[in-house]
Amino acid sequence: MQANRRKFIKSLSAASALVATESLAKPFGFPAYIPNLKTISPNDKIRFATIGMGIQGNFDTQAALRNPDVELVAVADLYDGRLEHAKSAYGKDKDLFTTRDYREILARPDVDAVLVVTPDHWHDHVTIAALKAGKHVYCEKPMVQHLNEGKAVIDAWKKSGKTMQVGSQRISSASFQEAKRLVEAGEIGQINYIESNNDRFSAIGAWDYSIPPDASTQTVDWDRFLGDAPKRPFDEKRFFRWRNYKDYGTGVAGDLFIHLITGVHFVTNTMGPTRIYSSGNLAYWKDGRDVPDIMACIMDYPKTDQHEAFQMVLRVNFANAGKINDVTRIIGNEGQIEFSENNLIMTKKKLPLAPGYGGYDSFFTFTEPVQQEFVKGYDAKYPPETRKADPVKEVKFEAPKNDDAHAKHFGNFFDNVRAGSQGTLEDPVFGFRAAAPVLACNESYFEQKVVHWDPVTMTQKNPTTPSATHKKKSTVASAKTVAKK
């Protein structure tokens, strides 16, 4: 009886995939939403495919495979060399399915989940198509490329009933979890200011990645890579170093600010800022890129039930030839927490109730009779016990040596897939609330304006007209094929 039931479920899954295949094949169509016909048993392997086998695609695949009871069954990429590499790296003991066309992956009944590790301008297209095809989705950060794309992904996720995780994995680290615990326990009092930076000074760190000598229109599917981006002749730099161009990426804001802000949102339980302003310039890496290599942003967070109003400043500097110390610092009125992915230092310092007098103070400018009167009133108001503060206290936390934030982030995703839950650590609502402010940084920079944002409704109060800088998304673009990250 059990065997017959499994055959029946498999036949339903195959039929659902056939529906998706037929619809995806239509030039301008989307597949109909496929309900949860297949339930994954806790004892079954989760079979996943990676769409985009570039740098991050490989790191994500390896992190996913460090979890038990999961299996890579297929990959997609638009550079033939990476498909060949995937076969040798992940298909030594099996016939790994490879394709340039991600739609072939979505049509496969043996794929339970997909990793969307494409250039940013393809995130929304592939994610929505995968959810409609009945797949669970792990999508790299930022979840979308532009502010006007987030709601469609959230709607598709809610309607699908599928599990979705956004990939800013640092929040799964022990250090970030400890920072969250300390803040929630009130250890540093009321937060009033946060600063976070991520600097670099190397060519690879500034995204000048290696380009294979065989890169050409024969080995690269250039037209499919462009998707709904502006049409242009083949350019291997734009394909292999796409982060350097705003047509395909999101610059330092979408690559690095997003990690910083995701961590802050996770630790403080905030929904986001209401006002965003950024500035910067292209100072060092003048290699044809059209995004800045230095950017700073200031954001205003309003008072909520979770926290007082605070200000946050983010910075990335790709030309920092000094000592680089990338940390996030959360400052409260009773202490601060300074943390990175691997360690944390909390410094507690409370002021005494009595303000004191003397020294660099106006007390010495009073006449002697007035000084005596002042001291008498001071002693009556502030007894000795109010004049001493608690000693400064420093607490250090080191993440365990085996702490693997990347694998743990995937573990949370897979656990929710098995449970049939949409409640991941970084679901699309959380993911968009983190992505929106950094995308607003780009809009602020390129349009030289303050961006006003409603973090509750996730709506921009002063949106840019589509004719200005936003590209127009079309259903034609959504039916095209995707490139690699």
Image (cartoon, helix red, strand yellow):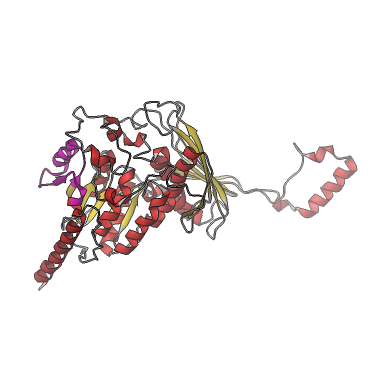
Residue situated furthest front in the rendering: 467
Residue 65 coordinates in the image, percent (x, y): 22, 48
- Rendered residue at 49%/41% (across/down): 444
Can the viewer see residue 45 in this picture? no
| Of residues 417 and 482, the one drawn nearer to the viewer in this rendering | 482
**164 or 277, which is in the foreground?**
277
In this rendered view, identify the residue nearer to me: 224 or 126: 224
Residue 78 lies in the magenta stretch? yes
Q: Is residue 272 left or right of residue 381?
A: left
Residue 443 pos. (x, y %): 46, 42
Give the position of the N terminus as an image quadrant: bottom left
Q: Residue at x 51, y 36 (%)?
A: 279
Q: Is residue 409 visible?
A: yes
Can you name the residue that lies furthest to the bottom here?
1
Q: Quadrant of residue 247?
A: top left
Q: Is residue 46 above or below residue 481?
A: below
Residue 462 lies left or right of residue 398; in this view the side is right
Q: Is residue 196 left or right of residue 213?
A: right
Residue 46 part of the magenta-drawn span: no
Q: Position of residue 55 (x, y in %)?
A: 27, 38
Residue 368: which quarter of the image? top right
**Quadrant where the image shows the C terminus:** top left
| Residue range highlighted in magenta | 75-103
